Image: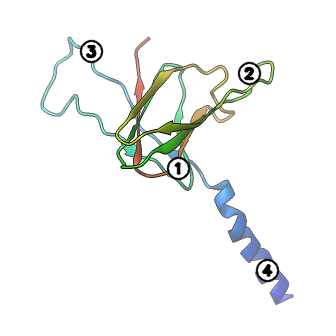
Amino acid sequence: MKKLILSAILSLFAIAPAFAARTALNVVQPKKPDQAVSANSLDVAFTAADVSNGNSFVSTGREYIFAQNSGASPYTVTITSAPDELGRTNDIDAYSLGASEFLCVGPVKQRGWKQSDGKIYINAENTAVKFLIVRVSQ
């Protein structure tokens, strides 16, 4: 009986990564040109991709996705679509981002992209890929 319980526990650990939560990306809302600006108040930071769990951000339909490959080799980026009202999907799948290149796509509308949890899903194959999510005003 002990072996059976131990086996069950070990099998749960083996599948646990499949249920790991995606790492949330911070969303930046840029200041308007007529707002007060102080030192470092316009700075933005890219976040390294979470290769194991993937990344996500809460969607409003007004976000631009920027990705930078800071590495010396090409790496891929995938933005996972969600079925629209007709069940269609259209992932941006394994988009090759060359060394030192940037990717920009958006605004990423909710229809066809927002997952059931209200988020947009992004994956990269290497931590050299860094993400920046910018939300524009309406």
In the rendered view, would you say 116 is above or below 124? above
Looking at the rendered image, the disc whose residue lies closer to the viewer, 2 or 1, is: 1
Disc 2 packing (10 Å; few <14; some 14–19; many ≥20): some
- Callout 1: helix, strand or loop? loop
Q: Which amino acid, mark 1? A: Glu
Q: Which amino acid, mark 2? A: Asp
Disc 4 packing (10 Å; few <14; some 14–19; many ≥20): few
Taking depth in this image into account, of 57 and 48 the one nearest to the observer is: 48
Specify the quadrant that holds the C terminus: top left
Does residue 100 appear to the left or right of 76 in the view shown? left
Give how far apart the Cα atoms at labels 4 and 3 are: 58 Å
Quarter assignment of residue 78: top right
Give how far apart the Cα atoms at labels 3 and 1 are: 34 Å
Mark drawn on residue 125: 1
In the rendered view, would you say 95 is above or below 19? above
Specify the quadrant that holds the N terminus: bottom right
Mark drawn on residue 7: 4
**Where does label 3 land, which residue?**
32
Q: Position of residue 129 (x, y in %)?
A: 42, 45
Q: Residue at x 71, y 64 (%)?
A: 15
